[in-house]
Amino acid sequence: MKESHDAREAARWAERARAAGLSIGLVPTMGALHQGHFSLIERARRECDRVAATIFVNPTQFSPGEDLDRYPRSPQEDAESCRERQVDFLLHGQSGGDGGVYERDFQTWVNVAEISEPLCGRSRPGHFRGVATVVAILFGLFKPHRAYFGQKDFQQARLVQKLAADLRSGVEVRILPTVRDADGLAMSSRNRFLDGPSRELALAIPRALEEAEAAFRGGEERASVLEQKVRSRLEAARGLEVEYVSALDASSLREPADDRVSSTPDGLVVAVAVRAGKVRLIDNIWLRRSSG
Ligand code: AMP
């Protein structure tokens, strides 16, 4: 595995792979890797000739007062995990300097308009502009054939699909299922900040989503009812602070027409954000008839 802190080197590596006719799979991350990230790497490994991963705690997607400085970092352990999974190129992104992900005097921003608005877009102004911009830069550097994102960050994954299509990047963006701990909690780099009681409380999230899924499987079609089920369950967990619960058309992230899951071409996503203690957690379920 080639490891580098220099974005220019990443571009050269990718150029050589492309010139040799090899397909490139890209897995962008912020590090502190866990099984959720590994599932993306492993899929890329199966589908592509060359796999690149990036570890970059992208400052532009954090607002002042968010946890940029406290975000967990474990670059050496991460590199070891990538090596074990046969990653070919690992970029440890730097925000400044000659080999930085951002050019000096950087001035160009990417804004995916509508998809950035609901859910986390409301509570984290500017967040998705930072995400879209860094992903566009990484796509420009690596020119991957495929890029791998987790359903865990559903709005982010949809936004990346939209930007890949709108900018005619040619990148095929894959969304892979959320990987969970045995008790159902979605894996997240931030879970390590949960103390015992907060983690216990946080289990209301998967339980609430499972309940909505069971209702959907049982024939419930109304988005508002599914949303309300999740909200009630979360609000009953005293100590959890609910930021949002929202059931949206999974492709447009708009309110589903006539409140029916059946009117959504690609199903319904029920997405939640809550605070458990000091930790902000997001999760969702994607309800589709075809998924069985
Ligand atoms: P992050 O390092 O949190 O920015 O995540 C990097 C990528 O890993 C994103 O595409 C995430 O959606 C994905 N990811 C994070 N957690 C999970 C999880 N539990 N299951 C699947 N994918 C995940």
Image (cartoon, grey):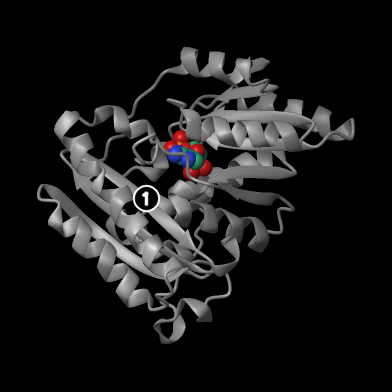
Query: Is label 1's Cβ within 8 Å of ligand 1?
Result: no
**Can residue 49 be seen by looking at this rendering?**
yes
Number of numbered markers: 1
Q: Position of residue 3 (x, y in %)?
A: 62, 16
Residue positioned most to the front: 218
**Quarter of the image containing the N terminus?**
top right
Q: Residue at x 42, y 25 (%)?
A: 32
Query: Considering depth in this image, is 95 or 158 the residue closer to the camera?
Result: 158
| 274, above or below 31, in the image | below
**Can residue 103 be seen by looking at this rendering?**
no
Q: Is residue 89 left or right of residue 212?
A: right
Q: Position of residue 79 (x, y in %)?
A: 55, 16
Q: Position of residue 187 (x, y in %)?
A: 40, 36
Q: Is residue 62 left or right of residue 236?
A: right
Query: Considering depth in this image, is 235 or 130 the residue closer to the camera?
Result: 235
Residue that label 1 marks = 283
Q: Tell me which corner region of the image, top left, top right, bottom left or bottom right, holds residue 142.
A: top right
Which structural element holds mark 1?
A: strand
